[in-house]
Amino acid sequence: MSRSGRKDSARGAKAGPGSAPALSPAALHEAGLLHLGAGRLLDAQMCCEQALAADPSHADSLALMGIVALRSGQHDHAVAWFSRAIRQTPKIDYLTSLGFTLKQMGRPDDAFAVFDKAIQLKPDDAELWKHLGGVLLALDRSAEALLSYQHALTIDPTHREAAFQSGLLLHQQQRYEEAAQAFTVCLTQQPNDLPALQMRARCVRELKLYDDYLADCERAQALVPADPMACSNLGDAFVCLGRSAEALPWFDQALSLRPDFVEVLLNKGFALLQLLRFEDAAGVYRQILAIEPGNAKASWQLAHVELQCGDFAAGWARREARWAMPDFSPDYPRFAAPKWLGREDIAGKTLLIEEDEGFGDTIQFARYLPMVAARGAEVILVVREALRPLLSGIAGVSQCLAYTPDLQRPAFDMHCPVMSLPLAFATTLETIPPATYLPPVPADRIAAWERRLGAHDRLRVGLVWSGNPHQGNDRNRSMPLATLLPLLDLDADVVSLQKELRPADKALLGQQSAIRDLTAELTDFVETAALISCLDVVVTVCTSVAHLAATLGRPTWIMLPHLADWRWLRDRDDSPWYPSARLFRQDASCRYEPVVARVRGELAAIAGFKSDAG
């Protein structure tokens, strides 16, 4: 049939003598829908025009004209047509089309009003609540959007789009368990829903459900075997499970698909570090820097490899790349005053020195403060309140202020972050300042702890088994209290120095009579220092108490993960930073049980000697 013939048929022009009767507006609308479905927009428009010529108030034809205008990119016309249709009959379909068009036009407030009206007409329509959620997102009202999507799911628990959008918003809010459940709704209906599978994998990784993470990554990689990111995620899952050797082939497969994929190279470098292949890891980080010379994360990681291997000259300097990392030390102000890194003469200047990392880092590198003052500078120190009583008496510190977000700092000429002090003094392994910089612990506080502890007729051992759970490597450096139970049957007085107990540890500690928990009285680091001064040995993981005890010169036994922090260097059981420290490292099994067994053996020997001597 010719094009003109098809139009004549659709138009149904006035019937002449002997011709077919004219088509009704409803029939013309149906014909228009057929043309629209076939992509013939002009024909669909002509059918609507004929229908409206016969009945200007025919709502379905008005709405179809809106759809044709929308498909043609004529949004203003579409709004006008949909609005006319709604004035005739406020059908849900018309309102939905109008709201969708307004949202596309960047008019979310108007779209919100339309969908709100639609929901008033049909409050049990899950699709409408989903649309409202999308408009609320466009209005940056994500909390309300989540409620809208979740309401859609109460109406239709299998609504895929509402579930997926809920999952995304819950993930943004770090509500990972709920987000994983939302993505599971999607996967229950479509097991090969790749976006939902990938997002659920991210959620279970955050929940440290690494077996589930591996299972989801394996499924995703099977769906898209040529996707380098899917291969890399699978490698990452093996790393999370402590199976870094199995991860490397997946990173290499990803790199065979995309050789310059920096994110995969970062993952590969990290896996190599877990295997203590420092030179290979350094090579990967240098490869990244050849691709992206400004990649701060690669510089940061390479700096730690260099420091761990004793190349302090390169490591301190490269570690300054941390300031280009957007999530690094967000509380450290970006001062207008210049940063001092050792090059300028500071005699007669006022230097602000402020903490920029953890408690332990600040304690370790506070040893440089007297050296700064010795160069003729007036030193203002800013640290968190818990550290202020401990560090305020260091020689050369003229003022020690407690950090608060709105702290008004006195006038100063230059500033230096605490962790940049080793660079400022060009520290090498041979020039590490001694750990003799803390002021004496008040004698009355030590005496008070001696009275609390009672007779000193057995070995006194202080224990710390976990650090800040938010620290990046905490799952490797910390252990549960249960792992230390073999130490509790020694002929010794065991004292807990562990603050911020995790729930399982708190429950177990309450059941143990062989360990004394006096941490409620450890109100600041000076109080902790006083208690440590009364102990014979402190056994601890790599956390702030390790630095405090070792700085006080107390025998400090530090239990380290297989890949220890850079400050403990490689293959050493002593530390140039702390003469009184001994290092007990995990072997390749990455388990703490063998470490605890070694510690127990040595403590038993000392406890027996002390008992014999007594």
Image (cartoon, helix red, strand yellow):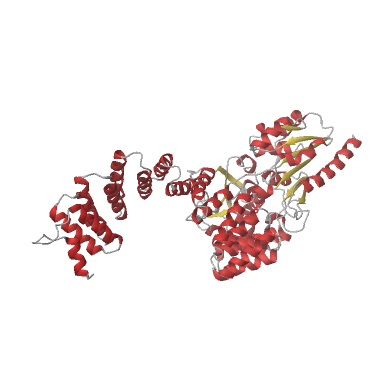
User: Which image quadrant: the N terminus?
Assistant: bottom left
Q: Nearer the viewer, residue 557 or 390?
A: 557
In what quadrant of the picture does the C terminus appear? Answer: top right
Locate residue 278, reporting x and y percent: 69, 63
The answer to which of 252 and 46 lies nearer the viewer is 46
Residue 185's spot in the image, x, y percent?
49, 46
Q: Residue at x 71, y 51 (%)?
A: 561
Q: Pinpoint residue 484: horizontal percent, then vertical percent.
A: 75, 40
**Number of marks in picture:** 0
Relative image position of residue 343 (x, y in whole percent): 58, 63
Q: Extreme right residue here?
A: 612
Q: Residue furthest front?
A: 18
Q: Would residue 80 be visible to someone looking at this image?
A: no
Above or below residue 539? Residue 272 is: below
Of all residues shown, which one is farthest toward the left? 17
Q: Is residue 505 visible?
A: yes
Q: Nearer the viewer, residue 481 or 614?
A: 481
